[in-house]
Amino acid sequence: MREYLSFDFESHALTTKQRIDDFIEWAEPGGTAGFESHRPKYDRKDPFFAYSDALLPHSHKNTRSWFVRQEYLQNASAGQYFSRARGDTEPEIKNPLALIRPGRFLSFAKAYLNVYCVIRRLDSIPKSSVRALIFLEKALRGLNGGDNDPSNLSHVAFHRAALALQRSKGSRTVAFDAGKALEHMALLLQAGGRFKGDQKHKKYPGFKLLGTPFAFRSAIKSPPRFGKKRQTEAPPEDKGHLTSEEVAAIGLAYRRAREEFGPDGMPTYYAGLMGLSLTTASMRPSDLQALRHDALYPNNGRYRLRVPRPKISIEQDVPVSKKLGPLAAEIFDVVRSYTSDARAAFKFYISQAPNDIQDVHTLFIPDRIKPLLKSEYLNKEQMHEIINPDATSRSTFPQRLNGKVPVTFFVEKPGDIFGKPGKTTMVRIRDLIEACDGLPVDIKVPVGARRDQFVHNQAARRLIGANAKSAAVQQALRKVFSGPKARRCRSYISRDDLLAHLLAEFKRSEFPHWPYTTNEKSVRLDAALAVHFRAEQSPHLARGASKGTWWLPTLLSIQVLNAWVAGNSANAPVLFSLLEIRHGDGSFPSVSVQRSRRYHHTAALIAGVSPLFANQLAGRESGWAGESYDYRTPSQIVKESIDTYDPDQDSDFIGPIADQAPSPARVLERKIFLAENAAPKQFTEIGGCRSDLALDPCEMFGDCMRCGQHLWRKGDQRRLPRINDMRDEATRIIQIAGKKLRKNPRLLSIEKHLRQKMEILDRCDFILGVEADPAVKLGTIVTFSPAPTALSSTELRSRLRKFGV
């Protein structure tokens, strides 16, 4: 048959849509071209392609390729969308929403498969072409507002489908083969040509369907097909810290998720968690897990965050940026509201079992579920409302309960059926006896049975005995089993059995540090912010629209968070692919909590913060660990190292060092003295320093505001806000310490801390006074005397030696 079929297709239509319609009528099974790769029974509305005998594997009577929508392709097993037909039976569609709907694209896809199998002389199923068509359909919908009309096919659609294939789950081989199938499709739908890699070197005809010609080549690289994986592959590239574009992508994802899914949506929750790590403070993944639900609080016009640092066993209270404070508060409230029910569940469980999760004896039931559990026995509809309210098909019990919870059958109440339940109508034994009254039968109620119990037709015949085959008895049976007294039994699940099963499922959850979030045991689960109900992916919903399971509260998994915002080599980040947020080159952004720490550290260094202070803010005890977070470029480092002081420029000096300098009459000696003793050798985040830290380590361990080497240059608007912040912080601590000392004057440690903060306050007030004094010129270098209680490392060692320590 293949030898005399013609592949010459020509349409004189002027529009692409009409040419595709002509192609469908020509190439589809039963069409004018005569291609028959499909079984004889063909319907355009069927969401599958049933292959003819020539393409079937051995021992198979039928084989179909189902057109499952891409977003449902890997969320669940195919058996949840349709049942595979066995023998001559017809398949059953369980979830129509998961399949490509009948229309022009489905008809086009099946027409293309029909002709492609013949033109390539295939003797097996073209799985790669089916997968390519599925991804191409999703690309069309994404580009055209949900419309998958094949007349909109373009180079962009093919390119987007190839990108989605490259980031899809599955092996690299499957993605590569589907990419090649896209290349074949692009050639055949245009002018035709030779397929790259085709051993026959045959030139295939084209159908000339598309209006704008283009050349498409899949960018998916060929994987190694044989032998072991090469050991010489380069290590994975270090993505470094976040770029500004990736940070903006998180903000866009949060706003878009709130618009599409609302503040209670799962995508909003994950976008909010990632947004918190960028708008508040540098946090490790373990810090984020241990963050309390009341960690963010307002204080004197700005927000502060209590950050637990389990890795170094401390809790920091750090200020949040004034500009980002309101946004951080908004995100924090959204995340806290989303996780409130999960915290209530943990509080309920911990009150029962403070030491071991296995001691939990009662299931937590939210208020919205309690009205649904009033009945002692629950039918299928009620079970779906409780377990899986998003299910579209409710003809069976939820799949997660199959074979795990016993099912009870009865008509009106439990125990009203004698023997096994029937699939057809049932009647009471007393109604059966009444119906057979006057007939030559003797119905005896079996031992253990009651006259008000129901029996099905076959059980009734067994009760009647040998005379059940007589015409009169059969007529009486038909009458009673189809009459008004006939009833049907239904299946139910006991409420107690259901609650016991759900409780056992919760107790199988893994909480290695119960009832705490981490092994440091500083924050309990019912006080943590990053808790939620575990999301069970439903085959009836797209990714991200699924609801949490109310009986399975859990702590945030960093692996799950990374799957949402970072992805991996095989899968795109769920959050960005769901919201269609891409870079300019079409790739998806990839972020993580760990990379946000690099972003914070690098941004702090670029802003002029000292590495020591940046490490302290990030909760790092050792300076060498911070070096791996420094992602400044060489040009940024050079730019930050060149500050505003020019030693050849004449500058005024005030302070104790200026008082010690030679008199102004001795011009040269005074200039040399001031250059050596008062000029800044380097700049810090709160001014400058007279010491060269490249030669000598800091004598005051970074306590610049009480050090005699500290310098300030009037008019430094870049560092002046930090002086104001330090003054506010010192004032706040002085007030707190004063209250505590009034209650107990013997608290010597607080008294020492109070003196230090008062010295910092005096230094800040002096600097602000210099800035406000019009008599002091701009650019004047201010020097300071050391604070009265300040001890350098040299002085400290001298004092320790004096006391024999």
Image (cartoon, rainbow, N blue to C red):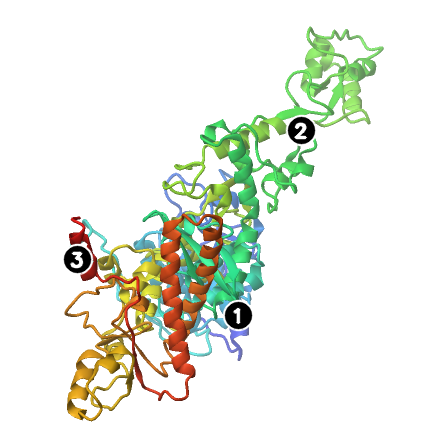
From the viewer's perspective, tell me whether residue 156 is left or right of residue 176. Answer: right
Instruction: Name the residue that disc number 2 marks.
Output: 377
* N-term-proximal mark, 1 vs 2: 1
Q: In which quarter of the image is residue 334?
A: bottom right
Front-most of 82 and 538?
A: 538
Q: In which quarter of the image is the N terminus?
A: bottom left
Q: Is residue 635 above or below residue 700?
A: below
Q: In this view, does 722 lie above or below 165?
A: below
Instruction: Name the residue that disc number 1 marks.
Output: 144
**What's the CA distance linking mark 2 and mark 3?**
83 Å
Could you tell me the amino acid type at mark 2? Tyr
Q: Which residue is drawn at 30% across and 61% down?
A: 789
Discs 1/2, front: 2
Q: Which residue is drawn at 44% across and 79% down?
A: 212
Instruction: Name the residue that disc number 3 marks.
Output: 798
Q: What element carries label 1?
A: loop
Discs 1/3, front: 3
Where residue 771 sits in the image (x, y, percent)?
40, 82
Where residue 376 sits in the image (x, y, percent)?
68, 28
Front-most of 643 and 56?
A: 643
Could you tell me the amino acid type at mark 1? Asn
Front-most of 413 and 645?
A: 645
Q: Is mark 2 on a helix, strand or loop?
A: strand
**What's the CA distance linking mark 1 and mark 2?**
48 Å
Q: Which residue is drawn at 39% across and 38% down?
A: 59
